[in-house]
Amino acid sequence: MANVVWHKKLRILLDLTRDDLDHPGLPDLWETVYRTDRFYGRLGVPVGERDLQCGGVCRDMGVEAPMHLRMRGGRREAVHERREDEERHTAPMSDEHKAYQERILRAAQEGGFSGDSEVRTRVGRSWIQTDTLVEGADGRRIGWEVQLSTIDQSGLRGVRARAVKADKNGITPAWHTDRAAYAQRNDAHWTRSDQLPAHVIARNGDLRIVSGFRVLDFWHCDTRALYPCPHGVRRCGKAHATPKPRDVLFDDMVRQTAAGAIVPIHFRAGSTVHRYWVTSTDRDRLEDLHGDDTRLPPEREAAPAAGASRNRPTCQPSSAPITVGTPPSPPALTALPVHEQAQTTESDPTAEEQQKPHTEQTTDGTTGLPSELITLQQAADQAHLQLQQLHDHHDREVQRQVWREAAATAQRAVTHYARTKRLNRYEVEARLRQFVRHTAR
């Protein structure tokens, strides 16, 4: 039984716990709906062909569950037609589902964002039920919906309607699953990870998203192009974008969507519109391409939105005991080959003047990195630590901005140093963070 019923013809939710069914403007609504349902029953109309469906848990999960009405001991009751629909209201949430909710909240908090699970948002005379709602930057709200049920693909209904409803009311829907059939649907922005037990999902290891995230490759349609022309001609001479699958870490996905670094897009390929997650940089370049496809959109400098990993999900790896105060030896930084363009830049007096302040700074004897980088990374980590210790909303907003500016400054310094020394930027950043965060313990 359920207390909330969806009327298909009237397209309203009926709350049986209220005398007016939560519709004061419609007098005698209960009598009208109840008598109509009883009339259908006397005529032998199947419950599945009537106008009433479960408006609670079943509807929130996108399942159409037919219901009929009855009076028991003076109480109004709505009864499911099928036992499995009734059991959906009493069946406990799976351990895997709980593990995903806990991981989303933990990842959001590590990024300086807040969130909550099982959030019910009032919208007019209906509700939006969100598995886990993350409050992101600049008023951004990400509604994570975890779908791990074993119902067949055709039984998962109402996803698109729920996604549109959430989006219209300021919640960016993010649907996650471990079922390949669901991830292939095109009714919402789906992401997928491998099917894993709850204790693995709950760990702080490399939980990868293997479907749903894309990197856009922008190219010019000429004789040197690697891709066929999407318009079906030999070469049209215009600029195009091709989405390429890319793995991304689940925790990074949670944090970057809240920060606005990863965003949803609608990508049209012929007559089909696909729904992907991409970096905000790729989204902006795609908008430039739609405005003028006669030339490639300009490059935009941006750090990678997230790192990918080929490791299976695991807990934090154990290692040999480390002496307190002595950081582990990170892998040596490998210099990148110097190209002709880089040589030209280094010979430019203007470039030498810009690089001079960075080349004359002191160097740490342990890591071989400039002391300035260590100081900037320490400042960013300290700002993030202060953010985690605050509870007032206004103070958190102010401190969050301080943390972002400090982190951005450190990132720019790392990028400049890696380019100047022709080093792999990822290795420089990993070495810096490993040293700073180990010595801070």
Image (cartoon, grey):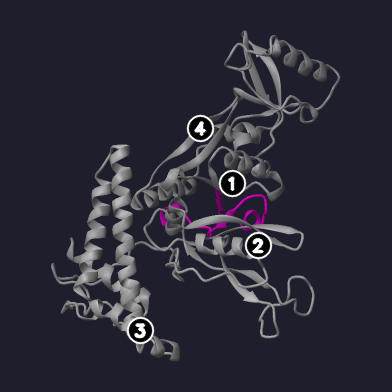
Quarter the N terminus occupies? top right
Q: Residues within 10 Å of mark 3 (few under 14, many from 20)?
A: some
- List the residue tagged with mark 1: 149
Image label count: 4
What residue do we see at 22% from left, 60% from top? 379
Q: Earlier in the sequence, mark 2 or mark 4?
A: 4
Mark-to-mark CA distance, 3 and 4: 51 Å
Q: Is residue 244 left or right of residue 318?
A: right
Task: Indicate which disc, 3 or 4, sits on the residue closer to the N terminus.
Answer: 4
Residue 221: where, in percent of width, then height? 69, 78
Q: Secondary structure at mark 1?
A: loop
Residue 37 image position (x, y, % from top left):
77, 18
Magenta segment boundaries in residue numbering: 174-200
User: For the residue labelled by badge 4, is the local secondary structure a helix, a strand or a loop?
Assistant: strand
The amino acid beneath tag 4 is Arg
Where residue 219 sits, quadrant-wise, is bottom right
Task: Select label 1 or label 4 by which is in front.
Answer: 4
Above or below residue 256? Residue 417 is below
Asked if labels 2 and 3 touch by Cβ distance under 8 angstroms, the answer is no
Image depth: mark 3 or mark 2 in front: 2
What residue is rendered at 28% in x and 39% in y?
Answer: 391
Kind of residue sitting beneath label 2: His
Cα separation between marks 1 and 4: 20 Å
**Numbered circle sitting on residue 290:** 2
Look at the numbered discs 1 and 2 and tell me whether their residues touch, using CB distance below 8 Å: no
Q: Residues within 10 Å of mark 2 (few under 14, many from 20)?
A: some
Answer whether labels 3 and 4 touch (C-beta < 8 Å): no
